[in-house]
Image (tube, rainbow, N blue to C red):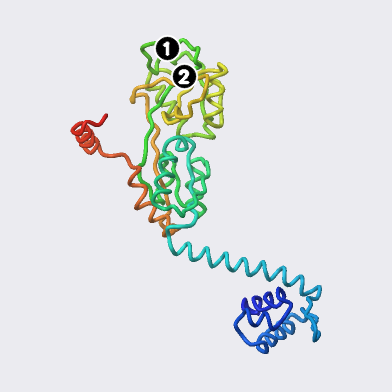
Amino acid sequence: MDMKQLRYFVMVAEELSFSRAAERLHMSQPPLSQHIKLLEEELGVTLFNRTRREVKLTDAGAVFLRESRLLLGQMLTAVDATVRAAQSDVGTLRLGVATSALFDLLPRFLAQVKAAFPGVDVSVADMQSQDQVSAISHGLLDIGFVHVRPDRDKLMHIPLHHDTYMAVLPEAHPLASTPKFCLADLADEPMVTLSREHGPAVYDAIVASCYEAGFSPNFKHKARNPLTIFQMVRLGFGVALVPRSYASSGYPGVCFRDLPPTAGKVHMEVIWSEKHATDLTRRIVEEVLPRLMPKPVEEKKADARASAAVGEPR
């Protein structure tokens, strides 16, 4: 049995006429009848009841028609997916992101992918960095945006982004409007933070920043995601330190205060597996990721001088 026989059978079943089916298939009727007879012999069942006046499906034939249509549909899907994959500018990109990448890095990346590869569908999973390392190592993800980790050495990785910290305070908090503000001002404040289980890199970086500022953070409340942090701060549970990109959420009832770069940074990098990389993954790495990478200091200065020369705002 092959797909050609299934197609012949479906055509006869739809027309309930061997002559009309043969005409649609651009073949003569005797070979078509012979194919159906051979199919029935192979299956050991009668698919059609034939008389001189009409052709009808048997009960077994009706079941086989349903299943044959499914098989033919799956074959077309497989062919289409194969052709799309070969074109390398269409298909699905399986992307993992650490939560802090959702606010700034991911929107910029998606805009670049859409512009360069409009036929690509992106599937996004919010995952901890260590889970992304495992998933990419096993070919379950194509690209990951992770916090810098020592366990990704067997994967391809390049620095991509870093965020400084901001303080999050209730709008009515005395420190929300004080003219001078620094990280040490939070030394006596109860704090809300991502649990280390859900954000180990961010958690450890915040602890290190507070130690550098001369105090040990009083992590009184733990959260699983940024929105929970903001709501806890809004309700007066405490204050928080978060990557600067989180401020783009515009969460009501809280105030975001700038902190100097010396308060610490969250470093992000992109990872992928050369072993499991598809042509699409390689093209995105080569064509899209360089546009997201931070410019060298000298290049930034050159851009600033060029903008000033034409009267553009810096």
Q: Are marks 1 and 2 in contact (CB under 8 Å)?
A: yes
Measuring from the top left, give residue 298's x and y in whole percent.
21, 37
Measuring from the top left, give residue 251's x and y in whole percent.
51, 25
153, 53: nearer the viewer: 53
Which residue, given by chain and number where applicable, does mark 2 sit on?
Answer: 255
Image-quadrant location for residue 312: top left
Disc 1 secondary structure class: loop
Residue type, label 1: Ser
- Residue drawn 52% across and 53% down? 140
Quarter of the image containing the N terminus?
Answer: bottom right
- Residue drawn 35% across and 42% down? 292
Which residue, given by chain and number where applicable, does mark 1 sit on?
Answer: 177
* Residue 26 vertical placement versus 254 (above, below): below
Residue type, label 2: Cys
Q: Does any portion of residue 67 appear in the rendered image?
A: yes
Disc 2 secondary structure class: strand
203, 294: nearer the viewer: 294
